[in-house]
């Protein structure tokens, strides 16, 4: 029985490991981030904390219960009184509006932070995708050169090849191996950064991604002017401005006098006899020295600051959208044009140079140059496709578009 349990446990661990090792798509990585990233939970708790904090201002004041005993010679008076402030100025309703706007602004700010984290993950995902594509192209180039080197070694052993040709090819293999090692470092760095978006302790070495750099999803067609209304950070400033306007209206109510009402029981004892009755007190606080001037000034300053930040952000959004759209479109056109004009032609160079080398028309340098140009063309195509992908991510962030609900 224990052996069966051990086998089942081992199978479960292996299956879990294989699931973790499965390549992630961009959508799967985003979903996992939303479920595991500690900052996502922190953003939600931050909004809940603010909500609980601002609601304290909207609670009615607590009643006051007091007991007083007065002893003057033969007379003893006992008072039991309950006092309550009267909410007749309407400040609590305005403070509830302030709280609602403040919480809504915090939620919009959390959405903006979430979009920034999503964009950062997509950029890291692209870095890892690029590293994997570069490693694949470099490995292909290395294999082709290594195959050529093995042929030259065999020819040299048979006395038909040139030692210079063999050494020159081996030198080229070493160069590609150095580039491949550097690419492996970049891949490991990207894996580590990607793992930081998931549950703490996620093994970076287990992460790999899948996707095509040549994908061309539709770019958002929203205008720069309309993008501001869609951006969560712009919405947060708009709500903050409205919140300070409500704060000012609430502060203006401090010019009105506040009132409180107290009532209770009175018991009087005189020369052995006692009697009971009631006590009623009405009090009014006259706003002479403090009339809410500081609160009004603070609200005006806060509203002016939020308005200025909103105007500045609108200008920044317009510039970001225009720049990101131009970059995304131009890099897409450049990548597609380079693919059509250069990549296919470069692939044919190796076949032509190899045939010419075998016929004695080309030397080893011309053949290696063909290999180098072909490899560089593949790597340049990867770089241009990655730039187009990063441009699309920047445009999504500029217009405030999330790629998943």
Image (tube, helix red, strand yellow):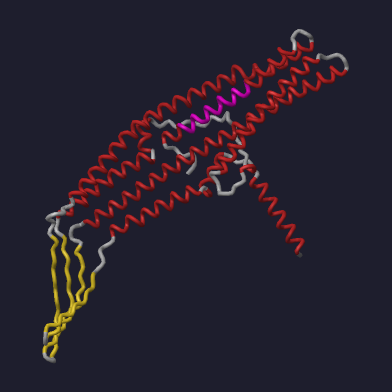
The image shows residue 385, relative to residue 288, as above or below, that is above
Give the side of residue 374 with respect to residue 125, left or right.
right
Q: Residue furthest right?
A: 158
Q: Residue at x 58, y 28 (%)?
A: 214
| Number of marks in the rendered image | 0
- On the image, the x and y values in percent for residue 291 come to 15, 53
Q: Residue furthest top?
A: 361
Q: Main secondary structure of the magenta part?
A: helix
- On the image, the x and y values in percent for residue 42 come to 45, 50
Q: Residue at x 55, y 19 (%)?
A: 337
Give the side of residue 119 with respect to residue 79, left or right.
right
Q: Residue at x 34, y 33 (%)?
A: 314
Is residue 121 or residue 222 the one in the foreground? 121
Q: Residue at x 48, y 47 (%)?
A: 39
Q: Answer with the quarter of the image where residue 166 lies.
A: top right
- On the image, the x and y values in percent for residue 392 come to 49, 31
Tell me if residue 382 is in the magenta stretch: yes
Q: Answer with the quarter of the image where residue 349 lies.
A: top right
Span highlighted in magenta in the image: 377-394
């Amino acid at each position: 029985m224990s052996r069966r349990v051990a086998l089942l446990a081992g199978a479960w661990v292996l299956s879990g490991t294989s699931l973790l090792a499965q390549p992630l798509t961009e959508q799967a990585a985003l979903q996992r981030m939303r479920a595991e990233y500690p900052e996502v939970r922190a953003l939600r708790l931050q909004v809940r904390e603010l909500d609980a904090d601002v609601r304290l201002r909207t609670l009615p004041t607590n009643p006051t219960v007091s007991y007083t005993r007065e002893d003057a010679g033969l007379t003893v008076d006992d008072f039991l009184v309950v006092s309550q402030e009267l909410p007749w100025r309407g400040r609590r309703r305005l403070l509830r509006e302030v709280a609602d706007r403040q919480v809504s602004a915090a939620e919009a700010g959390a959405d903006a932070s979430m979009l920034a984290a999503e964009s950062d993950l997509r950029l890291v995902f692209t870095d890892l995708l690029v590293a994997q594509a570069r490693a694949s192209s470099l490995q292909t180039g290395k294999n082709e050169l290594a195959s050529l080197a093995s042929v030259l070694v065999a020819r040299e052993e048979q006395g038909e090849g040139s030692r210079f040709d063999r050494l020159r090819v081996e030198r080229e293999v070493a160069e590609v191996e150095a580039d491949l090692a550097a690419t492996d470092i970049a891949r490991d760095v990207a894996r580590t950064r990607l793992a930081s978006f998931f549950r703490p302790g996620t093994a970076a070495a287990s992460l790999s991604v899948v996707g095509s750099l040549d994908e061309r999803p539709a770019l958002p067609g929203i205008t720069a002017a309309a993008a501001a209304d869609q951006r969560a950070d712009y919405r947060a400033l708009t709500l903050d401005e409205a919140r300070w306007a409500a704060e000012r209206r609430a502060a203006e109510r401090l010019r009105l006098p506040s009132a409180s009402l107290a009532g209770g029981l009175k018991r009087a004892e005189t020369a052995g006899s006692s009697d009971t009755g009631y006590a009623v007190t009405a009090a009014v606080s006259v706003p002479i020295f403090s009339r809410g001037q500081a609160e009004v000034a603070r609200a005006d300053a806060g509203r002016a600051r939020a308005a200025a930040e909103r105007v500045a952000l609108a200008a920044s959004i317009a510039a970001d959208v225009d720049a990101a759209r131009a970059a995304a479109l131009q890099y897409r056109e450049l990548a597609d044009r380079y693919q059509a004009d250069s990549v296919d032609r470069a692939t044919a160079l190796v076949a032509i140079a190899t045939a010419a080398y075998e016929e004695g028309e080309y030397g080893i340098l011309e053949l290696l140059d063909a290999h180098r140009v072909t490899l560089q063309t593949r790597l340049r195509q990867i770089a241009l496709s990655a730039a187009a992908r990063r441009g699309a991510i920047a445009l999504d962030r500029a217009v405030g578009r999330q790629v998943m609900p």
